[in-house]
Image (tube, rainbow, N blue to C red):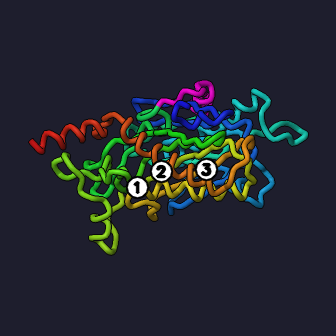
Amino acid sequence: MTGSITDVPGILVGHAQDAVAAKGCTVILCESGTAAGVDVRGGSPGTRETDCLAPTASMPCPQAIYLSGGSAFGLDGATGVQKYLEGKGIGFDTGAGRVPIVCGAVIFDLNVGRADRRPDQEMGMQACLNAGVKVAQGNVGVGTGATSGWAAGPVRRMKTGLGTASCRTGDLIVGAIVAVNCWGDVIDPETGEVLAGTLTDAGDGFAGSQQLLIAHPLGVNTYASHSTIGVVASNARLDKAQTSRVAMMAHDGYARAIVPVHTFVEGDIIFSVVTGTVEASVSVVGALAAEAMTQAILNAVRSAESAYGYPGYEEVLARRRKSRR
């Protein structure tokens, strides 16, 4: 067990990014997937091919899930993923040719780095070529331009990123991967420690995004939109309806670690995929998915380094320690 979503056999992850532009994408290849689902909780999602994941839709599982920066422009990179899969002869057999199904979602990071350079087909293809079982975390892939703590404007945000984690009980393995680009604060539910979020004016502590929000009943300036997007995967044998339930339960991981979450200006979404090799209760899979997602969120914050003028976890921690002397 490496503590990543690729602990689930058959799941591979690849990143590609433009560090100067602060934009990137991450692809989760699931060629051996047997069922998939999705649950959208945020009010401002940017997505691709989510309708085919409905339990009533005919497509059992996509061959890849694509997570990207660049807002809606970034969805262009999914075409590169599709071309990669087509070149390998992977996709839904239509009789006239194989059509790869690539589901996806994006975060809003246009106000970090350069807005005119976004993930494209070439970057999506490169992410596939980089795919493997080792998963880098932090300022990589879709997490390259991710930030958190938007309750008091851009200057009081923190740098966050991409994280992954996994849980296991017996032969059942459940993993999660997530890009944390949230409006609110990220809190360790075990200790109550705020790890990231809206900073104080001095930048050495946290102002409390929830408190700032409820202090203004008519709402606060939301500074565009934001999203936390992720994937949970397991080797469980479930049908599409059950796999969708796992995606729903995995959102508990968001709620445990992000306060507030699922706001009207966020595009929070979780995809779920299973590979169908281990008999397991959907309730057990969902509970482990929520736990893996919580840990992935915390890893995303702790792995993110200061960049693009935004301090990361270690820098803010050092500031806090210094201010207490």
Q: Amino acid at mark 3?
A: Phe
Q: Amino acid at mark 2?
A: Thr
Residue at left offset 32%, top offset 47% = 196
- Disc 2 is placed on an element classified as loop
Residue matched to label 1 = 258
Instruction: Look at the image and tell me whether residue 127 can be seen.
Output: yes
Task: Specify which label sits upstream in the sequence, 2 or 1.
Answer: 2
Residue 61: image location, x then y, percent: 74, 46
In-front residue for pair 179/226: 179
For marks 2 and 1, give the one nearer the viewer. Answer: 1
Residue 129 part of the magenta-drawn span: yes
Q: Are marks 2 and 1 in contact (CB under 8 Å)?
A: yes
Query: Which residue is the extreme one toward the left?
Result: 325
**How busy is the neighbourhood of tag 3: few (under 14 within 10 Å), some, or many (20 plus)?**
many
Residue 164 part of the magenta-drawn span: no
Q: Which mark is residue 117?
A: none
Q: Which mark is residue 271?
A: 3
